[in-house]
Image (cartoon, grey):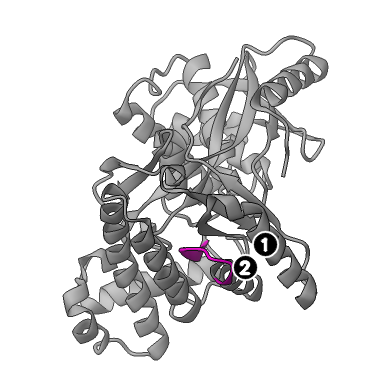
């Protein structure tokens, strides 16, 4: 976990741009990683999600080019990729640069007038931790493109929704990750000290107070360092199973299956596995609504109970947890957490726990000790606060 301040990263990425490109950038823009408090694998089922933006951000120093080419350099990878915008496809440029090129491709496809860019990227969002480093990358570039090409989308909620859709298309089509729109919407719509209640069907959002420090608690994130990837087929398989279940049940998506009718509905499905997948999605959507209500009532204990129920469902019914996530959440609970759950797509990545504010260090040490005892890679635990969305920094 980078301990650099935002000002230090802005200075570093701007200086690197000047060194690599030979001129100063027109500006530096950034977008945050995100943690989803609850509502996992509900976004592509038209459900509800409740993310917050992280203090950790991805920064893009950028300037216009006149030749219709994108030249992007990553300071994390010490790698430069160059591609003509007309040549951008799901096969080209590939890798991490696909997330950048895909944003310009998607904006152009939606009718926006975009062109070439020089871009240098730096980030404090852990990669592969399930904290949406990909959406932070996309949305930082989208914010830069919006201003540099005069698109005028960042200035309104509707415009930010259009940018989020472009970033989602970049990830789905060009980068090849079949994710829903949660991550991009959070990176472009979250506010400080609030969670964003997102209705993935209507696109409607509502800010829900989230400031656990007022109640003597903190949100602890643990990056388990277990390998996390959404393009290896497991995520896509879960999504396809949900779509097939909806078809068999005769509904547009699993959002249309009410909790009250869940058990009657799943008896119509052909396998125990599909029934379990549907149970998770339908009950998880319900948990999001109850968690938002609990936050608005200041009932963190209820939020913690919903965290625990969500993790159990993700582990047992959706089968996207792993040993590292289970150990981290169990250890946090044993150390006094109100609740703990995996967050993100699963198969590795991170978990979150609501812990007493004075216990952040003790819980972090206990999780690290539990990992060492089992021979897991050392985790990284850190407390976070709900932060703001994409913006211009310099």
- Percent across and percent down for residue 358 are 58, 51
Horizontal placement of 128 versus 377: left or right? left
Q: Which mark is residue 328?
A: 2
Identify the residue under disc 1.
224
Cβ atoms under marks 2 and 1 closer than 8 Å: yes
Residue 250, relative to residue 270: is it above or below?
A: above
Q: Nearer the viewer, residue 273 or 67?
A: 273
**Residue at figure coordinates x 54%, y 22% from the top left:** 144
Quadrant for the N terminus in the image: top right
Image quadrant in which you'd find residue 164: top left
Question: Does the magenta-highlighted stretch encompass residue 174?
Answer: no
Horizontal placement of 7 versus 195: left or right? right
Q: Which residues are magenta?
A: 334-342
Asked which secondary structure carries label 2, the reply is helix
Q: Return the residue found at the far left.
A: 260
Quadrant for the C terminus in the image: top right
Q: Can residue 160 be seen in this snapshot?
A: yes
Question: Does the magenta-highlighted stretch encompass residue 335?
Answer: yes
Image quadrant in which you'd find residue 228: bottom right
């Amino acid at each position: 976990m980078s301990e650099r301040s935002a000002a230090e990263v802005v200075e570093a990425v701007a200086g690197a741009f000047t060194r690599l490109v030979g001129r100063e950038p027109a500006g530096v823009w950034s977008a945050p990683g995100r943690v989803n408090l609850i509502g996992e694998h509900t976004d592509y089922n038209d459900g509800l999600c409740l993310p917050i933006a992280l203090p950790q951000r991805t920064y893009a120093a950028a300037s216009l080019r006149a030749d219709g080419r994108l030249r992007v350099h990553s300071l994390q990878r010490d790698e430069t990729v160059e591609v003509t915008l007309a040549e951008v496809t799901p096969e080209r440029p590939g890798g991490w640069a696909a997330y950048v090129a895909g944003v310009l491709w998607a904006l152009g496809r939606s009718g926006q007038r975009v062109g070439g860019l020089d871009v240098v990227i730096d980030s404090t969002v852990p990669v592969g931790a399930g904290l949406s480093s990909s959406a932070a990358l996309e949305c930082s570039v989208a914010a830069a493109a919006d201003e540099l090409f005069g698109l005028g989308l960042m200035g309104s909620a509707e415009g930010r929704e259009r940018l989020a859709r472009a970033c989602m298309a970049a990830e789905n089509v060009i980068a090849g990750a079949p994710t829903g729109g949660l991550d991009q919407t959070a990176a472009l719509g979250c506010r400080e000290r609030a969670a964003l209640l997102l209705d993935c069907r209507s696109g409607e959002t509502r800010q829900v107070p989230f400031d656990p420090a007022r109640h003597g608690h903190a949100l602890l994130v643990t990056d388990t360092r277990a390998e996390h990837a959404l393009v290896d087929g497991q995520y896509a398989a879960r999504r396809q199973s949900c779509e097939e279940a909806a078809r068999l049940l005769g509904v547009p998506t699993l959002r249309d299956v009410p909790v009250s009718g869940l058990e009657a509905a799943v008896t119509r499905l052909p396998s125990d596995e599909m029934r379990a997948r549907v149970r998770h999605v339908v009950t998880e959507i319900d948990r999001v609504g109850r968690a938002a209500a609990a936050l608005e009532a200041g009932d963190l204990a209820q939020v913690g109970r919903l965290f625990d129920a969500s993790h159990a469902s993700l582990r047992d019914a959706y089968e996207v947890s792993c040993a590292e996530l289970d150990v981290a959440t169990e250890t946090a609970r044993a150390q006094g957490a109100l609740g703990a759950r995996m967050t993100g797509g699963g198969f590795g990545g991170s978990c979150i726990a609501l812990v007493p504010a004075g216990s952040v260090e003790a819980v972090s040490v206990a999780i690290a000790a539990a990992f060492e005892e089992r021979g897991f890679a050392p985790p990284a635990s850190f407390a976070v606060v709900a932060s703001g969305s994409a913006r211009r920094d310099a």
